[in-house]
Image: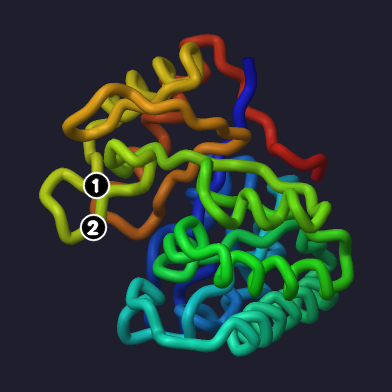
């Protein structure tokens, strides 16, 4: 049994620092790098891209709403064409910096509110897919398991890989519990890893207030922007390996 571990990173900008990307890159097998929308800047992109490339970590673009004040976690009303152009501009920017860094962007994973909305709104999902399909590089899509983006990418003939979240609680409909609700973020690596192992064995994720629901996953997301995130990520990786679960990227480096 094997699984990919991905994390959002490159989310600093200017003198403002978010997370410990260097340490996180030693833990994950895939890296979702912010593209200047919800966070990041050209220098942060460059440093993160180089760090990932040196370690053989597979690189993905992490576009989101251009809302740094809200860290991309607020829905910004936009027309589908505007979403497509926003995603294309951000991913294209990361691809440009990657060319300077000697790295290659292999997939796209929408961030925060954009990612959550793309799981529920097929129109938004189609807009993201249109951008990904138009960009060079034969980009794949990393999508919330069971959501509209997963369906839209498959319908367009793109390679798509579903993910689940290690440190987020789930609702009975298979969606993530909103961060505004108590218990939405898990902080205990033992509890989180036990849930992951049960999921990998059964294909069903435990949810709040209901029976486990069936989901598919090629990757597990670890967050790097919550208190204790690095210890959480280290603990989850160590416990998965101790359980005999191999960690490998869903795409070849």
- Residue 224 visible in the shown view: yes
Which residue lies under the disc numbered 2? Answer: 179
Nearer to us of marks 1 and 2 is 2
Q: Residues within 10 Å of mark 1 (few under 14, many from 20)?
A: many
- Residue 53 visible in the shown view: no
Q: Is residue 189 left or right of residue 163?
A: left
Q: Quadrant of residue 93?
A: bottom right
Residue 247: x %, y % from top left: 62, 27
Q: CA distance from mark 1 to mark 2?
A: 7 Å
Q: Nearer the viewer, residue 79 or 23?
A: 79
Q: Is residue 196 left or right of residue 108?
A: left
Q: Are marks 1 and 2 in contact (CB under 8 Å)?
A: yes
Q: Quadrant of residue 19?
A: bottom left
> How many numbered tags mark residues here?
2
Residue 169: x %, y % from top left: 27, 40
Residue 46: x %, y % from top left: 68, 74
Against 117, residue 172 (above or below) is: above
Q: Is residue 59 left or right of residue 225?
A: right
Q: Which mark is residue 185?
A: 1
Quarter of the image with the C terminus in it: top right
Against 243, residue 32 (above or below) is: below
**Residue occupying the far left of the picture:** 182
Q: Secondary structure at mark 2?
A: loop
Q: Residues within 10 Å of mark 2 (few under 14, many from 20)?
A: few
Q: Nearer the viewer, residue 34 or 21?
A: 34
- The residue located at (77%, 42%) in the rendering is 251
Q: Secondary structure at mark 1?
A: loop
Quarter of the image with the N terminus in it: top right
Q: Which mark is residue 56?
A: none
- The residue located at (43%, 61%) in the rendering is 116
């Amino acid at each position: 049994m094997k699984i990919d571990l991905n994390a959002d990173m490159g989310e600093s900008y200017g003198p403002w620092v978010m997370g410990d990307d260097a340490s996180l890159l030693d833990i994950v097998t895939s890296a979702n790098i912010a593209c200047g929308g919800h966070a990041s800047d050209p220098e942060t992109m460059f440093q993160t891209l180089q760090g990932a490339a040196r370690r053989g970590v597979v690189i993905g673009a992490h576009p989101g709403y251009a809302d740094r004040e809200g860290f991309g976690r607020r829905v910004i009303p936009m027309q589908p064409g505007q979403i497509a152009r926003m995603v294309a501009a951000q991913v294209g920017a990361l691809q440009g910096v990657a060319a300077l860094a000697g790295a290659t962007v292999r997939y796209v994973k929408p961030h925060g509110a954009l990612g959550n909305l793309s799981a529920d709104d097929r129109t938004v999902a189609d807009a993201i897919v249109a951008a990904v399909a138009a960009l060079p590089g034969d980009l794949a899509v990393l999508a919330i398991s069971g959501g509209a983006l997963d369906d839209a990418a498959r319908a367009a003939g793109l390679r798509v890989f579903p993910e689940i979240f290690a440190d987020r609680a789930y609702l009975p409909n298979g969606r993530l519990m909103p961060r505004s609700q108590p218990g939405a973020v898990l902080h205990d690596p033992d509890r989180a890893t036990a849930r992951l192992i049960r999921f990998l064995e059964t294909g069903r994720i435990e949810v709040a207030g209901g029976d486990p629901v069936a989901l598919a996953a090629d990757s597990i997301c670890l967050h790097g922007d919550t208190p204790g995130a690095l210890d959480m990520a280290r603990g989850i990786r160590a416990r998965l390996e101790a359980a005999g679960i191999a960690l490998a990227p869903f795409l070849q480096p």
